[in-house]
Image (cartoon, rainbow, N blue to C red):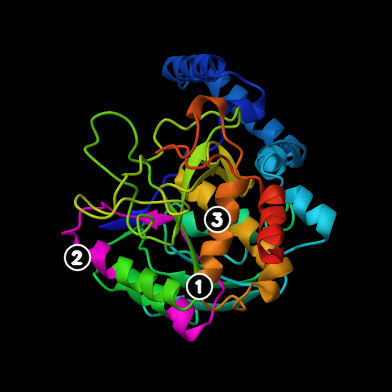
Amino acid sequence: MLTAIDPDAPGYPPEAYGATLEEAEAWRVATNDQLRRANPRPWGILVSLCLISALLVSYPAISSYFVGALTPNSNWAYEDTNIYALQDDLGLSGNGILVCIVDTGIEMTHPDLADANLVQYRDFVGGDHQTIQDRGDDLHGTMMAGILVADGGYQGAAPNVGLVVAAALDSSGSTQSETTVSDAIEWCWNDMGVDIISLSLGGDPDPENPLGSRTADAVTDALDHGVFVVAAAGNSGGAGTGVTDVSVPANVDGVIAVGAVKRDGTLWERTATGAETEGADGEVRIEPNQKPEVTAPGVGIISTSDPSMAIPYSASTGTSDSTVFVTGALALILERHGDALPDGNSTRDDIMLVKQALANSCQPNPLQGDGHHPRWGYGTLDALAWERSVADLIAQ
């Protein structure tokens, strides 16, 4: 089965409200105790009605306060990775770059997405290509799109890219089909001619998994035609999982596999561990294709969610989120240097150059030791250093 790597949006973290986890739990317990003690006496009903009236009167102010407090909460992720610096210093926004997100779809009615440049939408789940929608119960695709192209409560990594959306995951954020995701990937590069395919999805790297093999084949075809693929390393880290590599298709040679770090720069404990070889008996992976290649912010990321909600944002944690930060940084770099790549961004040589620049420019954490680490990768994303490294390799 192929699924969205982290389909559950757990809501807002307590720190978004200025509270600790312990304080939030105490409030929850106290609230529940009060509800259990409630009774239908007239004065109780009167008090309840007064409280409801007060909430209705103060609702606009409350809503405005929380929207203002929550939506900038993930700016740190763009700042710490120097994505905003790359935008500001070089005037980049992703203009002229086509990015395809294969996920659950997108809710274009969200105010932060209403002005996004949606070039094409295709529904591989239900075949309803005319109705632009997010088929996921958790709106996973909308959240991923927001990290990339939001322009409103916050600014995404590459807000002016041409956005192509393939809805290939169903309401649960998964697919049982052997062809749905692979067909979506092929459509992205073969029909739409995109520059980057962003895959915040994955599956068990078991070589006997037919869904994994079909998806891996589709990704390999894209890479062979010079299309960059960025994919989630997976959330299978930690003891006892039995998973021995990053997810499919992040495990494919040439793909940029992305792990997740926390706001304090430490590794997220569930980010997947990459194997040293391609499969159990395969060749040893060498730089710049060791897995994962890079880590990026992926914990407590607030992004666009259900537009019908008063506060249309939710928080998400996982390598899905970190994947899109790398996709956005890559879009900015291709905007600046795509035409200068030795083969015009049309072969695997270009992909290897950009990946080598990534390996050269990642910021290693002191805890990861020297060289590549099977969970940290080459280090954490630094978009500004990545762009400089690409420029240096092109000039050689």
Mark 3 and 2 residues: CB-CB less than 8 Å, in contact? Answer: no
The numbered dot on residue 227 is 1
Whether 268 is drawn above or below 197: the answer is: above
The picture quadrant where one finds residue 98 is: bottom right
Q: Nearer the viewer, residue 362 or 353?
A: 353
The picture quadrant where one finds residue 169 is: bottom left
Residue 309 in view, yes or no: no
Secondary-structure class at tag 1: loop
Q: Is residue 272 magenta?
A: no
In percent of width and height, residue 254 lies at 43, 62
Q: For the residues marked 3 and 1, what is the alpha-carbon distance in whole angstroms?
A: 16 Å
| Residue appearing at x 68%, y 45% in the figure | 78
How many residues crowd around disc 3 within 10 Å: few (fewer than 14), some, or many (20 or more)?
some
Whether 367 is drawn above or below 301: the answer is: above
Task: Give the quarter of the figure containing the C terminus.
Answer: bottom right
Whether 208 is drawn above or below 276: the answer is: below
Q: Nearer the viewer, mark 3 or mark 1?
A: 3
| Disc 1 residue type (three-letter) | Val
Residue 64 in view, yes or no: yes
In percent of width and height, residue 114 lies at 68, 67
- Quickly name the residue at label 3: 356
Q: Earlier in the sequence, mark 3 or mark 2?
A: 2
| Disc 3 residue type (three-letter) | Gln
Secondary-structure class at tag 2: helix
- Quickly name the residue at label 2: 210
| Residue appearing at x 34%, y 48% in the figure | 246
Q: For the residues marked 2 and 1, what is the alpha-carbon distance in whole angstroms?
A: 23 Å
